[in-house]
Image (cartoon, grey):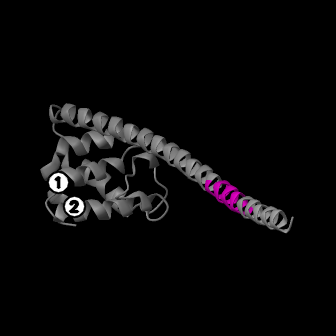
Amino acid sequence: MGLCKNQLEATQKGLKSSQDYLATQTNQLATQATELARYKADADSLKMALTSTEYQLNQVTAEKARLQETANKAQNSSFVSQREWQSSIDWSINNTGQVDCPQLYTSEVASCVVSGGPACVMSQAVRQATEGNYSRDLELTLITQCHNPAAQKQILAAGEKAVGEYLRAR
């Protein structure tokens, strides 16, 4: 009888040990499930951010295509007096107020939306012109005139080189 009692106690200890092990494993699985749910929520949030970024990129791409089309048309238009387009550029260079068309302000000049306005963008355009990147300085200049299609047309008609040289001289 003593032998059976010892075996019973050993079996009970084994069961208790197994129960403790199962409880530990259950807790670990619950923790992992919580972490997995958090990772899934993070992934969903990143997917939403990516969708928003893709939408913004599509808007910027469409606006760039519109500006390019306007540039192509402007190259075929009549001569624009130098004073008119330079005056529009000077307005942008000196305007530290609120921006128009903030969706056009790419990451390079996004900070200008909240601080510096068109003048901030034009400082980047001058830097691009100084580096000889006339195509980019023209794009930046046109962004500051998004509210004024007539000025955009005049600037485009002046051409990349003339605008770039004017900005280099600034």
Where residue 38 sits in the image (x, y, percent)? Answer: 61, 53
Kind of residue indicated by mark 2: Gln
Q: Which residue is mark 1?
A: 134
Instruction: Give the Cα separation between the discs numbered 1 and 2.
Output: 7 Å
Q: Give the residue displayed 50% in from the left and 48% down from the top.
A: 46
Which image quarter holds the N terminus? Answer: bottom right
Q: What's the magenta bit mostly, secondary-structure-wise?
A: helix
Is residue 128 a member of the stretch shown in magenta? no
| Label 1, residues with CA under 10 Å away: few <14, some 14-19, many ≥20 | many
- In the rendered image, which quarter is residue 158 located in? top left
Q: Which residue is mark 2?
A: 128
Q: Give left or right: position of 88 versus 6.
A: left
Kind of residue indicated by mark 1: Tyr
Looking at the picture, tell me which residue is in the foreground, 157 or 102: 102
Whether tag 1 and tag 2 are in contact, CB under 8 A, the answer is: yes
Where residue 17 sits in the image (x, y, percent)? Answer: 72, 64
Direction right: furthest residue: 1
Magenta-colored span: 20-32
